[in-house]
Image (spheres, rainbow, N blue to C red):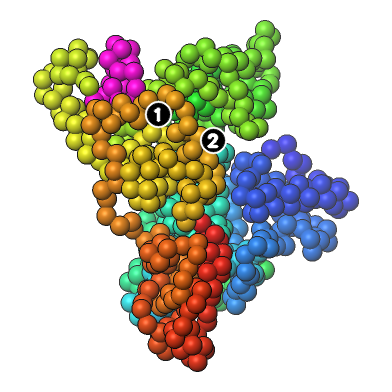
Amino acid sequence: MTDKPTNTLTEEQAAAEAAKLRPQLLAWGKQYYDADAPSVEDDVYDRVYARLVALEEAFPAIVTPESPTQRVGGSVRGDLPKVAHTIPMLSLGDVFSLAELSEFNDRLRANVDEDFDYNCELKIDGLAISLRYENGKFVQGSTRGNGQIGEDITANLKMIPSIPQTLSRPLTIDVRGECYMPKAAFLALNERREAAGQAPFANPRNAAAGSLRQLDTQVTADRQLATFMYNIADYEPLNTRTQSGLLDELAELGFTTNPAYRVAHTMDEVWAYIDTYQAQRSNLPYGIDGIVIKANSLPLQRAIGATVKVPRWAIAYKFPPEEVQTVVENIEWTVGRTGIVTPTAVMDPVVLAGSTVARASLHNPDYLQAKDIRLGDTVLLHKAGDIIPEISQVVGDKRPADAEVYPIPTRCPSCGAELVHLDEEVALRCINPNCPAQLAEGMNHFASRNAMNIAGLGPQIVAQLFARKLVTNVASLYRLTTDQLLTLDKFGEKSAQNLLTAIDNSRNNSLERLLFGLGIRHVGAKAARSLAANFGDLNSLMAADSETIAAIDTIGGIIADSVVTYFDSEPVQALMKELATVGVNLTYTSGPSEPVDPLGTFANQRVVLTGKLNELTRPEATTWLEQHGATVTGSVSKKTDLLIAGEAAGSKLTKAQSLNIPIWDEAQLLAAMNENK
Ligand code: IVH
């Protein structure tokens, strides 16, 4: 760092420098907390923050109440209800070197009369949450917000399997911990987002934060979030009096805790712990950004106390981010299933955070241009969120004199068709329906597990099938013969037979698998299931107009329009005929669908329907209510929570009125359906 040592500065100089740093930190902090989209690396933020702390510590008179050092960070989003934390949720002080960690230890030991142990824990890279239990029942969950006031995210947290609804003992406690997205879930989510033309999340933490602030709890449920709990606002109700014991007791109560903690009696043991997990970091299935050391005795923690912002009994040792230099040798453009053409930087291979890296996605032309990456450039490479190789920036001094601005292609690298931007998307697309690269990607999707589930039909085989002209589209898969398959690399009788059997079996799949496998824009597995269940067979769906399709409760106008547009095309109609000819099942044969949102608006509500509904049929209304957690019963009693009364309702309405049971009309039900789409 080129910062001047604080003891060489005058107070005016320190004040001037701090005044420059504060708005910058506040702006970065706001992007980080409110927009879930950091604009700088954590490391840059941390270092600038550390500099401000150093300036303010050296010259306490320059501290301002607005300084980012005086708040826990983050602000409360207006669109979620607020929760006051009765006991504030603190952050952690951090250190970046073993020397600084040593100083922390010396300072603490100098101020504490007794000998004490540390509990070492992994610093999970997620976001802090607080869970309130009353008599053992989960009643409220919140984010940290600014430390005093957080956001109420109870409904979202209820969708996370590792959060117990009921504890093994009827305690009233506030338990704190970290909510995170496992690396694998993060990668899969970003893959889905990119395939749908959506911007990928920068890292798992942002993805977790975005998922928790969702208004649609079903989206949260699909995001595979997980938790590690590590703290309690007040330890009194527990049996244990140590931090390590606390982790064990939280686990006994039903929480998920991180098993990798260790009690350290000496600093040597702390160093050993840091070494172990710094080396393990890239192998863990979740991101960690450091190690937290905490005085192990809970009464001692209480005696030592905290500043307004951080406990004095704990500190975070932050890992240095791994960053390496390498040279960009090529930029490859690949065509995805939906025609999106994505640039990838191909680099001189380097080892980074535990793996060899030679490629990094450049996402889209805007990204490539914004970073101004040119062939031959030396670049700084890091792993975003500890996983995804990403180019941070070009090393300007090392740019070859003859490096030219990289031209954005105008033609598809696979078929040569002109590339376009649809609906002002940043993504570049090839819209030729016969583009070979798209067809091959489309076939990979068709064969994938949630689609037609054809085991053994992977990308390499698909590429060969196309290269040898053995297939032209997905229907032609069903005409393949053993002899044809025997011409593929490393294919013997047995592998040919296995693949043919897998293809053959897929003929009998229920319609939703085919609908998903066709890769219709915006039609994911869930929408495909709703479409199949509601229309029953392909012909009815193909004959339906957009309005009829959008009338299905889980299907919106965008999906409906996309379905209609898809089946409107002649080549698609020809393909459907071909699929019928080769014997692919075109009807819905699966059982009733799983509950969509069992913990949703109607969770545990007993609902009665009466009278004549105009927009909906009775079964439609019943199914929807049940999918959203309701029990639909036939008669009104004191136990009924809601009566939905259509036209000309009779005795049930009168009875509900006399029992003061809430009554909705059909319009209110339709509005609820719309809200829960
Ligand atoms: S203890 C008063 N333990 O790191 C207790 N925090 O940078 C304060 N974090 O706000 C927190 N893993 O969100 C603690 N094992 C761990 C942690 C952990 C991750 C987070 C937490 C905290 C942030 C501070």
Indicate the secondary structure of the residue bearing disc 2.
Answer: loop
- Whichever of callouts 1 and 2 sits on the residue coming sooner in the sequence is 2
Question: Left or right: where does residue 3 sit relative to residue 181?
Answer: right
Give the residues in magenta.
460-478
Distance, label 1 to label 2, CA atoms, is 25 Å
Residue farthest to the top? 402
Circle 1: is it few (<14), some (14-19), or many (20+) Cα within 10 Å?
some
Which secondary structure dominates the residues rendered in magenta? Answer: helix
Residue linked to disc 2:
197
Q: Between 165 and 252, which is closer to the camera in this rendering?
A: 165
Check mark 2 vs ligand 1: CB closer than 8 Å? yes or no. no
Residue 68 visible from this viewpoint: yes
Residue linked to disc 1:
573
Q: Residue at x 68, y 49 (%)?
A: 31
* Amino acid on which disc 1 is placed: Gln
Q: Residue at x 27, y 50 (%)?
A: 590
Residue 371 on image: x %, y %: 65, 26
Residue 564 on image: x %, y %: 49, 38
Q: Between 539 and 358, which is closer to the camera in this rendering?
A: 539
Residue 403: image quadrant is top right
* Amino acid on which disc 2 is placed: Gly
Residue farthest to the bottom? 658
Indicate the secondary structure of the residue bearing disc 1.
Answer: helix
